[in-house]
Image (tube, grey):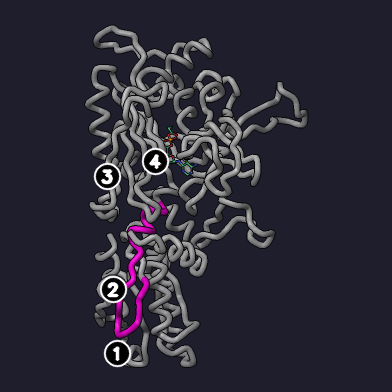
Amino acid sequence: MPSNVLENIISLCKRRGFIFQSSEIYGGLSNTWDYGPFGVELKNNVKSAWWKANVWQRSDTFGMDAAILMHPAVWKASGHLDNFFDLKSDCKSCHKRFKTQDLKDKDRCPECAGELTSARPFNLMFKTYQGPLEDEANVVYLRPETAQGMFVNFANILDSRHPKLPFGLAQIGKSFRNEITPGNFTFRTREFEQMEIEYFVRPEDSDRAFEEWLALRFDWYLKLGIKKENIRMRPHSPDELAHYAKSCTDIEYNFPFGWSELEGVANRTDYDLKQHSQASGRDLMYFDDVRKERFFPYIIEPSAGVDRSVLAFLVDAYCQEGVKNETRVVLKLHKDLAPVKVAVLPLLRNRPQLVEMARCLALDLKKSFVTLYDDTASIGKLYRRQDEIGTIYCVTVDVQSMEDKQVTVRDRDTMQQVRIPVEGVERYLREKLT
Ligand code: GAP
């Protein structure tokens, strides 16, 4: 994939209102991004597609929304206070900081060749204080993963919903990590969103469940339009595995900066429930009333990044096509993900009757689809603008429309146009979009 694709996408995201640099008017907060009008629609569509596939369309999962702030004892029991470190090395000359793991030469700065400090551990959790007193007794952390909110609610789910194994919890929410080397646009940031499933199974079923979830999650990206050649699975080698994991496979995407992790699917064993059981004193075992057995279930965890998924969908959908000696830039996003489904465009904006007809149609379509009305440029420019947003259909109202009550519907991908009666537009689009 050409490396300038990322620059093109960053520029399109700003130009069209998808993603902006955070606090830009103050010079920007580096590696922090705000989602604008179309960005938030795209992101919400990604989250809805995930929720639909993993909660609504299954009968063995439950949704959750745990708080970001948790009791600090959670992070002791989970191992984050003791193990959630990266090694960092600082340059003694230019004072830049590096993740030691990324350095080829551990002694010399890759930017100015200055001497590097020895590697020092750096805990990635954001620390803050609950309440007005900034003392050790009031320390709390911004969660670095949503997962722990589900583990500590395991007993509440058993007691309130009485599920039988296997069953899962699913959650979407913000996580925070004080990354040493964030970068590559929204790929690695300090504030990000995760979509995580914790699927509880009998230990002997965990290998099979792991394979099933891996296949399901891989297919989810393909169904939403990611090209086969741009996605792959990469099993972790034993020395890469987290301390709690029996196995883990990353689903990777071929980003413009190389193959990188989109999602990890891990077999976390019974580590988490055992740890929280021991540390809290609450019994987090499962009782199988048929076999009369008590045990700690194993957990299969498919853990995806919302922002990374959005970035992968943007990269995959980005196209430049030659059309009549011009370059057309178009986001060929899947219909479920496209931020805008329909744009209504009057061909002439100085004809009140025509504008009125287009506005009425747009208002009507807004009841069913995310619809835009735009009359601020010539039709050619309006089409290009909608192509860059990824709008699936453009409906044009022209002079003839006032006579024959017909409009032109243009398809984003093929650019083919059909003329249909205005009263049939909603039904036509509904058939195409659902
Ligand atoms: N509960 C397991 C867990 O958090 P992880 O591999 O550290 O596993 C899961 O994170 C996913 O969260 C990653 O695959 C990635 O998509 C996303 N993610 C992790 N750190 C991120 C960061 N700094 N910026 C953006 N996304 C991140």
Quarter location, residue 244: top left
Lower sequence index among marks 4 and 1: 4
Which residue is located at x 30 percent, y 74 percent? 321
Residue closer to the observer: 237 or 380: 237
Tag 4 and tag 2, C-beta contact below 8 Å: no
Q: CA distance from mark 2 to mark 1?
A: 21 Å
In this view, the mark in front (2 or 1): 2
Tag 3 and tag 1, C-beta contact below 8 Å: no
In this view, the mark in front (3 or 4): 3
Amino acid carrying label 4: it is Ala
Lower sequence index among marks 4 and 2: 4
Q: CA distance from mark 2 to mark 3?
A: 31 Å
In this view, the mark in front (4 or 1): 4
In this view, the mark in front (3 or 1): 3
Q: CA distance from mark 3 to mark 1?
A: 52 Å
- Farthest top residue in view: 292
Badge 2 marks a residue whose secondary structure is: strand
Q: CA distance from mark 4 to mark 1?
A: 50 Å
Q: On screen, 8 above or below 247? A: below
Residue closer to the observer: 421 or 198: 198
Q: Which residue matches tag 4?
A: 304
Q: Which residue matches tag 1?
A: 404
Identify the magenta region.
310-329
* Residue 223: percent from left, percent from top: 26, 51
Amino acid carrying label 2: it is Asp
